[in-house]
Image (cartoon, rainbow, N blue to C red):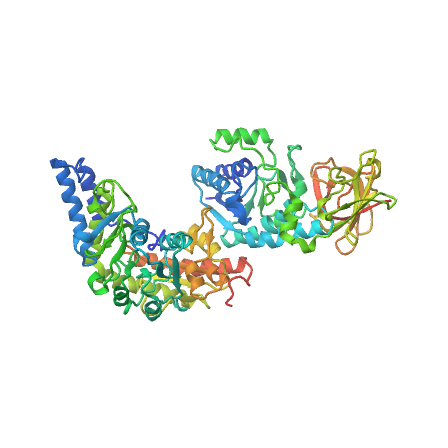
Amino acid sequence: MRVFLDHNAGTAVRPEAAAAISRVLSGGEGNPSSVHRAGQWARRTLENARAQVADLIDADAREIVFTSGGTESNNLAIEGVLRRAGSRRRVVTSAIEHSSILAPLMNLESRGFEIVRIRPDRDGRVSPCHVVETIDESTALVTLGLVNAEVGVIQNLDGIAARAADAGAVFHLDAAQAAGRVAIDVAALDCDLMTLSGHKIGAPAGIGALYIRDDCEIAPILLGGPQERGRRAGTQNLVGAAAFGAAAQAARIAMASERERVRGLSERLLSGLMTRIPGLRLNGPADGRLANTLNLTFPRVLGESMLIALDLEGVEVSMGSACAAGAVEPSHVLIAMGRSAAEARSSLRMSLGWNTTSEEIAAAIDIIPRVWRRVAAAEPAEIGEAV
Amino acid sequence: MGARVMVAMSGGVDSSVAAALLCESGYEVVGVAMRLTPEAAHLPRRRATCCSHEDFEDARRVAERMNFPFYVVDLREDFAARVIGNFVSEYLAGRTPNPCVMCNREIKFDRLWQRARAIGADYVATGHYARILRGADGRFRLMRAADNSKDQSYFLFSLRQEELSRTIFPLGAMAKSEVRARARELGLANADKPESQEICFVPDGDYAGFVERAAGRGDVRGGAVVDSSGNTLARHAGIHHFTIGQRRGLGVAAGEPMYVRRIDSHNGTVVVGRRDELGAAGLIAREVSLVDWQCERGTPHRVDVKIRYRQTPVPAELSIGPDCRAQVRFLEGRPAVTPGQACVFYRDDEVVGGGFIERALEA
């Protein structure tokens, strides 16, 4: 039996999204920018998808720009704001962001911008007071993840939007992991920009969106045609957008019931593992965490060995991020949360999704402790010991 | 599905064919590439060495083609501590280390084996050219490869019963040309890839430079180059620049070619001499291990010894002493002895054991 517990990396395509893909593929040719009727059909399909995505976050359809995914959305948000930032040289962020935030900011840093990276507490929570204090009149952009992908912590953003607006800074939220899992209302969050990703909610990879509040102006980074109201040139990915729209709608409708179901499965998995693996620790807060995400430090084993051994038994989990060569690097998020490199190397992320079954969880509770005992017996005991 | 075997894959033709052969024999193959050196991603392209990003991709392609799972495992810390650290300290002590032997002993057949057990593998396989035979008594014997020109049993002398019982060398009975032919048959893209020659973590071959960068200048001391009578002929920049038999780079202008005879680490002196002064009567080996040979201590035994990888074995008398040491006396000729290198004991085609050369015996 295959047990897929890596939904934060990319979840299965929802049947509604698959159906939308088939409809577009069999609907014939058509470029949404074309004048003829095929073009008009394509445009209708695209705008319908845009409205569906907008609904997921209570936005207006005009505020949704389709992109190739979360990485492009984050790059567009950062670069698009900074190109219009004038004399403002500061960016406020946290130390636990996704690589598509970290890397563009490192690039800005090398161009002379000041990047302030707020460190989280031991549970991965970024203090909103700390963020607020750091925003000043020279701040161009505040960019934060609404939910952290590795530990699932949901950030408290109290006062940040108001302070950013006050200081004249743009407020960007990376909601790639949050959308479809927690209810999002962009008006209540009061952000200017928000990143969304298709394959985290049940569309295929290759489609994403950036919410750009109507009164927020950013510079395009892809130049060309007038698509997406001049904010992102290039013929739209109609198949992807239709799938994204369908997945967004399905996720929105099922959100409350899915969340409760996933919470039940996740709690069962956690308690099942805790009772069978003495010394197992959960990273991240007990509350204020995405129900689907379990980041666990396993005693006396290397996560890399666990990951491989579990995969060979059919249980697919993840750890940190893969380097170019395919080896696994310890999670920068856990390190920023104050864990030692050894602890980070002994930690695995298990993330459940919309189609996780009770049978999968039962199998995981059976297999994971068994594999842990074997790995712990085979490899040196000092590795992964708590510091 | 047969027994699970973890195959150490470098991306080269040998380990690729080894993995493919095991697949065809019905084993459940798990391919693993070891990430050993931190610089791997930044090495110049097309270098004949293992561990670069492209080599991992070659290995991955083989796994995809043969449809078995493949992973990269990070053994950089162990490799730095147990292989590179040893390499540097040996050079600084005036010896010439063989990191491939250390890598086999400390990484492939130790750490990697632990990893194999962790993932539930029954065996570890590599693309080494050597054979393992199981006798009627159930004991395992380590044998030279069928293809003598490719034989790598020299690098494997430290394997003992426990390791041999869970190790497979699928290429031991094959010739290199057969391996390349099999690679082409299997459609492996790396069939004609050049063989790796250099030490993988020193791809430019500048061992002295590597030792200096790793050790720091403080540990490097200059000294004198002297002749056999003790006359100083030149100054040198550190004993790690020298190996026994070396002729170039001595800074000595003598009428006839001079070679490094001996390196004295305590005073940093390099002793040079004529070619006919190079040889030794025997050697003392340390960290001696025996594959499965219950030989009597102190009693001389007739063996053949190989004291460099690319060297024909020479007949010798071996006496096992205390403290994992052994004395070897050559029965024919006076070969040059290089401390730090492995000395491997053979009886016919069988490896009976080996050790690391501590010092030469002059007489």
**Which residue is farthest bottom?**
A129
**Which residue is farthest left?**
A37
Residue B156 in view in this figure: no
* Of the pair B231 and B302, the residue shown nearer to us: B231
Residue A39 in view in this figure: yes
Instruction: Give coordinates of residue B310: x percent, y percent.
Output: 70, 36
* Of the pair A119 and B344, the residue shown nearer to us: A119
* Of the pair A135 and A183, the residue shown nearer to us: A135
* Of the pair A350 and B122, the residue shown nearer to us: A350
- Residue A181 sits in which quadrant? bottom left
Q: Is residue A52 above or below residue B43?
A: below
Count of numbered tags? 0
Give the residue displayed 43% in from the left and 58% down from the top.
A331
Instruction: Give coordinates of residue B271: x percent, y percent.
Output: 81, 45
Q: Is residue A297 above or below residue B357?
A: below
Q: Is residue A194 left or right of residue B332?
A: left
Q: Is residue A155 left or right of residue A242?
A: right
- Residue A136 sits in which quadrant? bottom left
Instruction: Give coordinates of residue A332: x percent, y percent.
Output: 43, 59
Give the residue displayed 51% in from the left and 44% down from the top.
B42
Q: Is residue A349 left or right of residue B257?
A: left
Instruction: Give coordinates of residue B317: x percent, y percent.
Output: 81, 43
**Which residue is farthest right?**
B229
- Residue A195 sits in which quadrant? bottom left
Q: Is residue B337 above or below residue A302?
A: above
